[in-house]
Image (spheres, grey):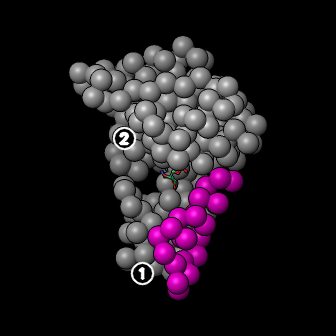
Amino acid sequence: MIGVLASGEGSNLQALIDAGLPVTAVASNRVGARALERARAHGIGVACFPLEEFESRAERDRTMADWLEARGVRLVALAGYLQLLTPDFLERFPDRVLNVHPSLLPSFPGLHAVEQALAAGVRETGATVHLVDAGIDTGQVLVQRPVAVLPDDTPERLHDRIKGVEHRLLPEVVRELIVQ
Ligand code: GRF
C-alpha cells in the first residue's frame, strides 16, 4: 500500500493514481492543497497535519506516521511535499520513503530547482527519483531522466516539460519497489 505526501498541486499524485497503483492514503501539511481534492475525488483517505497544530515537528511526524501505518502504508512517496521529515519518521519506513525532484541531483537541490537550472545556464536538467534521508534532496538516487533546456525557456515551460517526465518516472519506480 502506498502513502503519498503532497503540499500542492498533486499532479504527481494524479500520475500514480492514473497508473493504477494502490494509493491508499494521502497526507498534506496544507489544508488547501489541491492534491487532497484529487485524492478525495478518487475515494482515497486524506488527512492534513499542519505544523502549527502540533507542539513540534517530531510530534507532527509521529502522528502522521501512525496515521499512514494504520492504513497499511508500506511505501511513502513524496510528491511535491515541501517539508523535511524527522529521522524518526524515516526509521518507521526504512528505505521506503522516496521523493521526486525537478533536477538531475546532486545539481540544484532544494527549492526553485528549475529557476536554479535556468540561472546556471545549463543545457540539460531533468527529473530524479531518490530515497529520502534527513538532508535536503541528498538520499540515494534511484533513477534520473534528462530534459533539454531550450533557448526561450521560462521556468513555467521548463517545469511543465520536467513534470511530464516525472509523471512517467515516479509510477515506474513505485511499481518496481512495490513488487520487490
Ligand atoms: C514536482 O516538480 C516535484 O518534482 C517537486 O515538486 C513538484 C510537485 O508537483 N518536488 P505536483 O504537486 O506533483 O504537481
Determine contact: label 1, label 2, CB under 8 Å. Answer: no
Quarter containing the C terminus: top right
Residue at left 34%, top 24%? 60
Magenta-highlighted residues? 147-169
Q: Can residue 177 be seen by looking at this rendering?
A: yes
Residue positioned most to the bottom = 151
Q: Is residue 148 magenta?
A: yes
Q: Main secondary structure of the magenta part?
A: helix
Q: Is 38 above or below relative to 91?
A: below
Q: Is 88 above or below relative to 149?
A: above
Q: Would you name the residue on which mark 2 appears?
A: 83
Residue 154: percent from the left, percent from the top? 48, 75
Dot 1 or dot 2, earlier in sequence: 2
Q: Is residue 163 magenta?
A: yes
The answer to which quarter of the image holds residue 113 is bottom left
Q: Secondary structure at mark 1?
A: loop
Crowding near pointer 2: few (<14 within 10 Å), some, many (20+)? some
Q: Can residue 180 be seen by looking at this rendering?
A: no
Q: Is 8 on the left-hand or right-hand side of 142?
A: left
* Amino acid at pointer 2: Gln
The answer to which quarter of the image holds residue 84 is top left
